Image (cartoon, grey):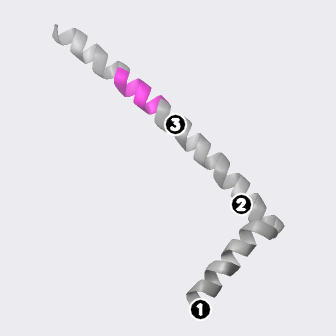
Amino acid sequence: KGVMKAIGEIKDFFQSDPLGKKLVEVMKEVGSVCQMVRKKARMALKEYVRKLIKEDE
């Protein structure tokens, strides 16, 4: 029961507290930045591999 109460309090913090809401916004933004970085890294790696394959031919 103590764990469920703690989870409820945390959920309430992120849903109703102004600071909690701001943290949610910031974390969403961080998540989107991470997705963009991963996408750019994958594109760069893909291009690098293509160049290596082209050199091998």
| Residue drawn at (76%, 67%) of the image | 15
Q: Which residue is mark 3?
A: 37
| Residue drawn at (72%, 67%) of the image | 14
User: Residue 40: where, in percent of width, then height?
Assistant: 48, 29
* Residue type (three-letter) at the residue carrying disc 2: Leu
Please report whichever mark, 1 or 3, sits nearer to the chain's N-terminal start. Answer: 1
Q: Tell whether 50 sits left or right of 23.
A: left
- Taking the magenta stretch, the answer to whether it contains residue 43 is yes
* Residue type (three-letter) at the residue carrying disc 3: Val
Image height check: is 22 above or below 7? Answer: above
- Quadrant position of residue 34: top right
Circle on res. 2: 1
| Residue drawn at (35%, 23%) of the image | 46
Q: Which residue is mark 2?
A: 23
**Residue at mark 1 to residue at mark 2: CA–CA distance:** 24 Å
User: Residue 33: where, in percent of width, then height?
Assistant: 59, 41
Which part of the image, by quadrant, shows the C terminus?
top left
Image height check: is 45 above or below 7? Answer: above
Q: Tell whether 35 sits left or right of 46.
A: right
Label 1, residues with CA under 10 Å away: few <14, some 14-19, many ≥20:
few
